[in-house]
Amino acid sequence: MSANIEHILAQAKLQSARDAELKSMPFYQNTMAMIGHVGLLVHNRIKPRIVNVTLTDIIKAAALEPRIFEILPALLIERNDFVLIDEVPDDLTEVLDAINQNQPIHKMPILRGTTPEKYIKWLQQKKHQLSGE
């Protein structure tokens, strides 16, 4: 194996360990538990439960689990009982405004790499299984 491939594999292993550590932290655990409780995603290792989570922590968890960005507009519009709105980023505000204004999907903004087709489908959707790594 070349030194470059070995370096890439070592970096991937380090990143995986960092991600595993972050996923054990309360911001991620609580986010996944709350999302499971409201019925949008079910994680196979984190039991759904009632817990309040700040929007900041949800966005932080989405950096580890990008599918959270897919469900985030639906969570805020339809199932926000357990979301503590602390600060709404501009890009999320633009998405929520576009949805509330019933803009055509081709005019809606992308949310941190998540296309409108991906986040619109979650509005009034049932939960989907999300397996743990």
Image (cartoon, rainbow, N blue to C red):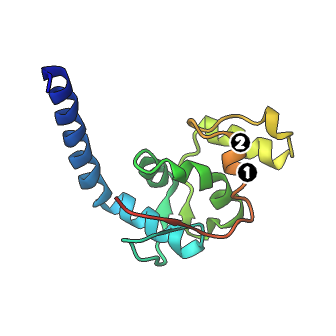
Percent position of residue 128, x then y: 58, 66
Percent position of residue 111, x then y: 62, 38
Name which residue lies at 49% across and 77% down: 50
Measure the alpha-carbon separation of dots 2 and 1.
Answer: 6 Å
| Quadrant into which the C terminus falls | bottom left
Task: Looking at the picture, tell me which residue is in the foreground, 77 or 65.
Answer: 65
Q: Quadrant of residue 97?
A: top right
Classify mark 1: residues with Cα within 10 Å, few (<14), some (14-19) or many (20+). Answer: some
Is 132 above or below relative to 39? above
Task: Looking at the picture, tell me which residue is in the foreground, 94 or 6.
Answer: 6
Q: Tell me if label 2 and label 1 are in contact, CB under 8 Å.
A: yes
Percent position of residue 76, x then y: 65, 58
Q: Which residue is mark 2?
A: 116
Percent position of residue 15, x then y: 25, 41
Amino acid identity at mark 2: Pro
Name which residue lies at 67% across and 41% down: 93
- SS category of the residue bearing label 1: helix
Q: Which residue is mark 1?
A: 120
Q: Is residue 52 left or right of residue 64?
A: right
Q: Quadrant of residue 103?
A: top right
Name which residue lies at 61% across and 55% down: 71
